[in-house]
Amino acid sequence: MTRSVRRTRRMLWLAGAGAAAALALSACSSSSDSTDSSNSSDSSASSGTSTSPKPSGTVTVFAAASLKESFTALGKEFEKQHPGTKVGFNFGGSDTLAASITGGAPADVFAAASPKTMALVTDEKDTAGTPVTFVRNQLEIATVPGNPHKVASLKDLTKAGLKVVLCDRTVPCGAAAQKALDASGLKLTPVSYEQDVKGALTKVELKEADAAVVYKTDVRAAGDKVEGVEFPESARAVNDYPIALLKNAPNAEAAKAFIALVRSAEGQKVLSEAGFLKP
């Protein structure tokens, strides 16, 4: 074999080896890039870079009448924290609100003044998840300013000639008042039964009644329009207030955010300042 032929074959062999090495390097590079890409994707997924949608639109809250002042304040705070949102409220007797919800009224959140009235909704499977107690409330006697009839106890409400107003027994404040009366062995015939606690309080504010059994929070909210009288039997009739996201909530994301605010330290501070007890 001539030297020129051997030189030619050697050059061809070196060229082939170089090409093979280049292919191997290319494959390694491709594999590395793929792995890096995969790792990057996995890292992104595990870091939780995806976030929940920001609250937007209107959230409709059905709430017990006794929550009016504190929830109105929290609604304004919610709108401030989430620009572009709006909180609409429907305040009233918890039983009436529950009936509206089970009847198909569009609402996102229900905050009731007792577990019994919340059960009217949960029994119909109209809540999403289990309701949570967020505050408690205790009864107090509201009299006209100056307490001219010298009401000092629950028993004093049974005095002849005293015009007393109670909440209807179907609503939480009325059921709690009856429970306190029963525990004391007292019988009381009011001049009227009102459909919610604000209705009972208004009768005293307008001096259409001498006294009413309402919540501490309502006495505080009324300021100098009424005078409050505490009574020990109220400790036997403290109401738990549950809150729940409704199953057919038109704006579930905003509803969850509002419930979170109510249960937050900030929300609890507003409720405590209104006179509510911690759950």
Image: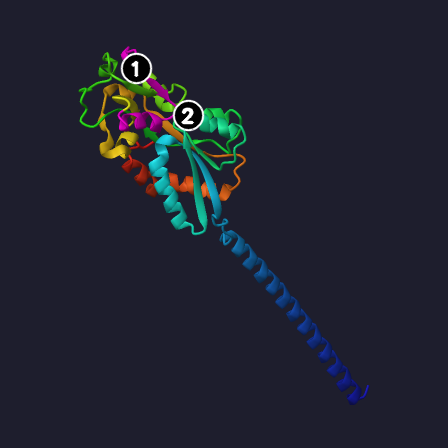
Q: Which stretch appears magenta?
A: 181-207
Label 1: few (<14), some or many (≥20) within 10 Å?
Answer: some
Place residue 163 in its image quadrant: top left
Kindly identify the residue that appears in the image at 41 percent across and 20 percent down: 170
- At x 53% / y 53%, what residue is drawn? 45
Query: Percent from the top left, x then y, of residue 47?
Result: 49, 53
Report the amino acid beneath label 1. Leu
**Mark 2 residue type:** Pro
The residue wearing badge 1 is 181
Q: From the viewer's side, name the closer residue of 12 and 109.
A: 109
Viewer-proximal residue among 194 and 139: 194
Tell me if residue 277 comes above or below residue 270 in the rendering.
above
The mark closer to the camera, 1 or 2, is: 1
Q: In which quadrant is the C terminus drawn? A: top left
Q: In the image, residue 124 lies at what x, y percent?
A: 53, 26
Residue 211 point in image, percent of width and height? 26, 22
The residue wearing badge 2 is 115
Judging from the image, what secondary structure is the residue with disc 2 in? helix
